[in-house]
Amino acid sequence: MIFNKDRNFLHISIPRTGSTQMNILLQNKNLPEPDQHHMTLADALKVHPEAAAEDCFRFTFVRNPYDRMVSLYFEFTKNRVTKYSQKVDTDKPLFHEFDQGDDVSSFRNFCCNFKNTEWVDDIFLKPQADFCKSSICEMTHIGKFENLNQEWEDLSEVLIGKKISLVNRQKETHKEAKPRSSKHLNFSEYYNVESKLAIQEFYKEDFERFEYER
C-alpha cells in the first residue's frame, strides 16, 4: 500500500498483480511486511483517512484468479521456498503440506485443500474483491494485470505527471523494478476439473466482480 499525500493517490497492492514493481516505480523501494504492503482498502483508510476524500485517486490491479493462484504457488515453492517475507523464515518449505511429489499434482492438491488449513486466512490468498471493499468510499480505478503495461502508461501520467513505459523501465535504469515472476507453464496446464471448481468456489466474487471467465 502506498499513500502519496503530495500527489494525492492511494495504491492498494494486491499480491501477485505486479504491485511490488509498481511501488518501486512510484519511488517506494522500502517494502514493508505483507500485512502492511498488502493492506486492504478498508484497513488503509484507517491509517490514512484523508485518502477517502473524493479527489484522491485510489487504484489497484487485479488478475485472473486461475493465473494468480499458479503464480502464487510457484512463487512460494520455487522462489521463496522457506522465506515467507523479509523477516519471516519458516522451518519447512512453504506449502510443504500439499506436496505430492510433482508440481502438477501438488498444485492441484493445494487448490483443493488450502481452504481447510491455516492458509485460508493468509493475506496472500485473500480474495481480490476483499482488498477493494470499504463502507466509506470506492476504488477510483481497478486495472487488469493482463493489460498492465498499457494501463500503466496512462496511470503514470495521472500519478506522477508523466508517462513511464513499464517495459522500458524494466530494461533500462530500473532493473530493481523487474517483475518478481515465477517460471511455470501457462496456468491452464495445471488445472483439472476438481481444482478448477475449488478455485471457482473460493474466488467466486473475484470472477463475478472483475468479469473473469470461469
Image (cartoon, helix red, strand yellow):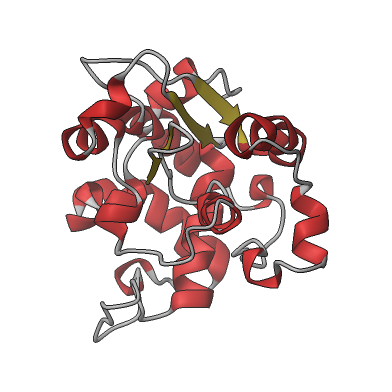
Compared to residue 90, the image places residue 123 above or below, namely above
Q: Residue at x 79, y 47 (%)?
A: 165
Q: Is residue 192 visible?
A: no
Which quarter of the figure has residue 168?
A: bottom right
Q: In the figure, 89 relative to 191: above or below? A: below
- Quadrant where the C terminus lies? top right
Please state the total of marks drawn on the protein image: 0
Q: Nearer the viewer, residue 55 or 80?
A: 55
Place of residue 173 in the rendered image (x, y in percent of width and height, measured from the top left): 76, 69
Examine the image and state in which quarter residue 131 appears: top left
Q: Is residue 167 above or below residue 5?
A: below
Determine whether, in the image, residue 117 is placed left or right of residue 143.
Answer: left
Residue drawn 40% across the image and 72% down it = 99
Residue 184: give x, y in percent of width and height.
67, 63
Q: Is residue 182 left or right of residue 116?
A: right
58 displayed left or right of 130: right
Identity of the residue furthest to the bottom in this view: 91
Provide residue 192's location: percent of width, then percent of height: 56, 44
Judge by depth and name the residue closer to the eye, 182 or 35: 35
Q: Which of the pair 174/181 is nearer the observer?
A: 174
Residue appearing at x 30%, y 30% in the figure:
130
Q: Is residue 13 visible?
A: yes
